[in-house]
Image (cartoon, rainbow, N blue to C red):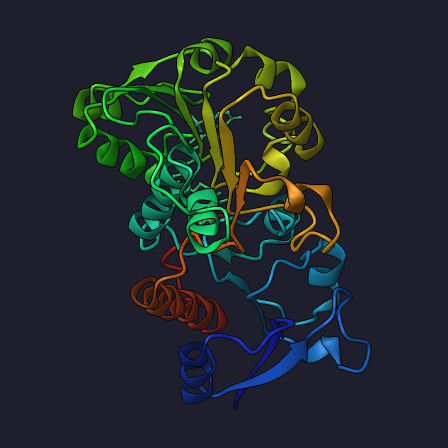
Amino acid sequence: MSWQVLIQSDVVPYEPITRLLAASDCCLHWWRDAEPPRDIDYSVIDGIYSYGHFPVTRELMERCGRLKIVSNFGVGCDHIDQNGARALGIPVGNTPGVLDAATADLTWALLLAAGRNIVTGDHFARGPGFQKYDAAVLLGQQVTGATLGIIGLGRIGYQVGRRAIGFDMKILYHNRTRNASAEADLGARYAGLDELLQQSDFVALNCPLTPETTGLIGARELALMKPTAVIANAARGPVWDQEALLTALRAGHLHAAATDVTYPEPLPRDHPLLAEERLVVLPHLGSATQQTRDAMSQMSVTNLLAGLKGQDVPYRIA
Ligand code: NAP
């Protein structure tokens, strides 16, 4: 008997996933648009494999008559109604840990790109304006010895902190609860949100998107930051207020910003943020290395199959 799996993706999924699913006797029903498809029989669906970020609502889970598992490709599950899944007794699996290094590396790529004018510099070096070396152009902010503030010092944030040690940085962090082992390992100091923003030269957003973190960084918080500060968002777009960020950048408050994530994602092509030179924007590349994608594929399919078979889901968040 094959398992009936609703696979959510508006692009062709990373190849190992469909190979692993086909080898596991899964019959795939494609969900390619924002709305779940109308032409499938939900009463036979055993599992949902979430590859894109379309919302997995309680109503959808209830419609799937035989649903045993929701497996997410990725660690961030803000698009899945986890409380709804708990209420229905449906396990939700994700892929923690295997993407920490890749996402921390990318957080650093964002911080360095914004702080050291890498993208602007690349455009300048290729353009007609670069005729003579000039030691006074495109001055960035010193990374070595600066203060880094990590908002969300969990698995990924910890790896961001580890990398900061190589830059001789002082590390502040803000979570809802203190992380004693990270304090000991990294020499990080716990700070309230306002204090972290006031004292940091570089700020990394690495928290999950929750009702509490939605709009965590707004106009008031940006105003607390140093005018020379750099902020990078490797979490989720709605963690900061994009309009407030644009206003702060246009006003020359902040040296620069960088983001891997936006809302909506992607932004409309004529969105003013895309025209802002002091913002580096990436297309959600946090965990996008071949090695990490392979590990995420394996882990998410393992979760799916365990749930389908009624076994314990190895990486379960709900
Ligand atoms: P994690 O281990 O659960 O760490 C999250 C951290 O955020 C925890 O230390 C948590 O501490 C803190 N946090 C939660 N709510 C907070 C709040 N209201 N204020 C301040 N801190 C808060 O998660 P992770 O694996 O590191 O992943 C973090 C997030 O990164 C994911 O949820 C995902 O959205 C994002 N991500 C993005 C990419 C990308 O491609 N850009 C890739 C992977 C992950 P407390 O519980 O003590 O508050």
Residue closest to the eye, 147 or 209: 147
Please tell me in which quadrant of the rendered image residue 20 appears: bottom left
Tell me which residue sits at (18%, 20%) in the image.
Answer: 184
Looking at this view, name the residue that lies furthest to the front: 131
Q: Quadrant of residue 145?
A: top left
Q: Measured along the vertical axis of the image, is residue 75 above or below residue 187? A: below
x and y, in percent, of residue 75 in the image:
45, 51
Count of all numbered marks drawn on residues in the image: 0
Q: Is residue 181 left or right of residue 41?
A: left
Residue 110, compared with residue 310, is above or below; it is: above
Q: Nearer the viewer, residue 41 or 142?
A: 142
Image coords of residue 216 (percent x, y)? 60, 25
Question: Where in the figure is residue 99, as x and y percent of width and height?
Answer: 35, 53
* Residue at 50% from the left image edge and 39% from the top image edge: 258
Whereabouts is ligand 1, in terms of quadrant? top left
Pick the front one: 145 or 126: 126
Residue at point 41%, 88% (across, down): 23
Q: Residue furthest right?
A: 38
